[in-house]
Image (cartoon, rainbow, N blue to C red):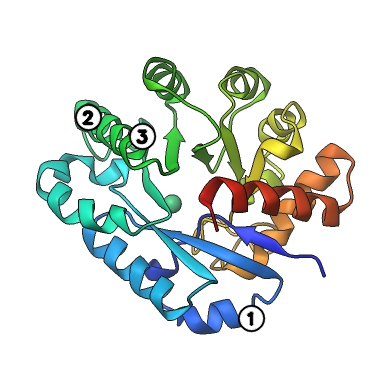
């Protein structure tokens, strides 16, 4: 049986019952539910507790919320302690919903905590390739750094590849407009890749107009299989192996 791991789905931000979404995703062996602040990290933990051995959670403060770091920090620390990963964190200079300085401070703190707790770090990177690269180059990277919803082209994919990070692909690799992303994927060895839905957002084709959910994760994996000229089952095996190794599932 072909099984996938959805390494990034916000089931706690979905209006639909997470149990129903997990039940109809029989081909998805594990899911990781990242938080974006204290409240959503608690909700993510609830989902993990409700589906032991199947759903896992991560705790962190999204770059959009980074200006709340000083007040969220104390609530996040104990949640991080029981999580499989720290995040999501990162930098978003596209929407800039928090000031750049606050984003950077929060990202650096998450990075430091991930090292200290020896847990993987889930990194959101939008219009911030250089800045994320510089943080990782200066403070350390490795397979434990998961670049979530990777959208880099060949140039940035090669540069980050040298730091031995993990690339997580989402729905945009299936889009008609996803040529740059596919050319980026083409230079990355499949062993370095995991897949995600980022649900309920960014549904892959042909579901793009509707809400996303874990059962669609294979569509992203199948798009990657076409890029690499591999069987989808092989991509499922490689990405699941990487996800299980990185997140310790
Ligand atoms: Zn996310």
Tell which circle, 3 or 1, labels the residue nearer the N-terminal end. Answer: 1
Up/down of 55 relative to 208, above or below: below
Position of residue 239 measured from the top left corner of the image (x, y, whole percent): 70, 49
Number of marks: 3
Instruction: Quarter of the image for the N terminus: give it.
Output: bottom right
Mark 2 residue element? helix
Checking the image for residue 115, the label placed there is 3
Mark 3 residue element? helix
Q: Is label 2 in contact with label 1 (beta carbons under 8 Å)?
A: no
Position of residue 199 measured from the top left corner of the image (x, y, whole percent): 51, 62
In this picture, residue 249 sits left or right of residue 37: right
Checking the image for residue 78, the label placed there is none
Q: Is residue 107 visible?
A: yes
Q: How far apart are the two marked residues, 3 and 1, measured between alpha carbons? A: 36 Å
Image quadrant where residue 249 sits: bottom right
Residue at the spot x=68%, y=39% of the render? 178
Q: Which residue is mark 1?
A: 24
In this view, the residue in front, 23 or 111, is: 111
Up/down of 119 relative to 38, above or below: above
Position of residue 71 measured from the top left corner of the image (x, y, whole percent): 10, 48
Position of residue 31 measured from the top left corner of the image (x, y, whole percent): 54, 64
Q: Which residue is mark 2?
A: 105
Decide: few, some or many residues near mark 2? Use Cα within 10 Å; few <14, some 14-19, many ≥20: some
In this picture, residue 109 sits left or right of residue 1: left
Residue at the spot x=17%, y=40% of the render? 67
Image quadrant where residue 128 sits: top left
In this picture, residue 122 sits left or right of residue 46: right
Tell which circle, 2 or 3, labels the residue nearer the N-terminal end. Answer: 2
């Amino acid at each position: 049986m072909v099984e996938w791991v959805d390494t990034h789905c916000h089931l706690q931000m979905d209006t639909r019952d997470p149990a129903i979404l997990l039940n109809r995703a029989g081909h998805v062996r594990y899911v990781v539910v990242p938080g974006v602040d204290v409240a959503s990290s608690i909700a993510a933990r609830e989902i993990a507790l409700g589906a032991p051995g199947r759903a896992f959670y991560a705790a962190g403060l999204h770059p959009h919320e980074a200006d709340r770091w000083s007040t969220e920090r104390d609530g996040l620390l104990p949640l991080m302690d029981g999580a499989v990963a720290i995040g999501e964190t990162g930098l978003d200079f596209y929407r800039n919903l928090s000031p750049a300085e606050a984003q950077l401070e929060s990202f650096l703190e998450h990075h430091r905590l991930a090292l200290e707790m020896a847990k993987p770090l889930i990194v959101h990177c939008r219009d911030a390739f250089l800045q994320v690269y510089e943080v990782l180059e200066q403070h350390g990277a490795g397979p434990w750094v998961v670049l979530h919803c990777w959208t880099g082209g060949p140039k940035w994919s090669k540069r980050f590849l040298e730091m031995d990070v993990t690339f997580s692909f989402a729905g945009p690799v299936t889009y008609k407009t996803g040529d740059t992303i596919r050319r980026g994927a083409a230079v990355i060895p499949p062993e370095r890749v995991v897949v995600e839905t980022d649900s309920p957002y960014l549904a892959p084709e042909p579901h793009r107009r509707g809400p996303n959910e874990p059962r669609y994760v294979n569509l992203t994996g199948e798009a990657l299989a076409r890029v690499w000229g591999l069987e989808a089952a092989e991509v499922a095996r490689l990405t699941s192996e990487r996800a299980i190794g990185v997140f310790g599932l």
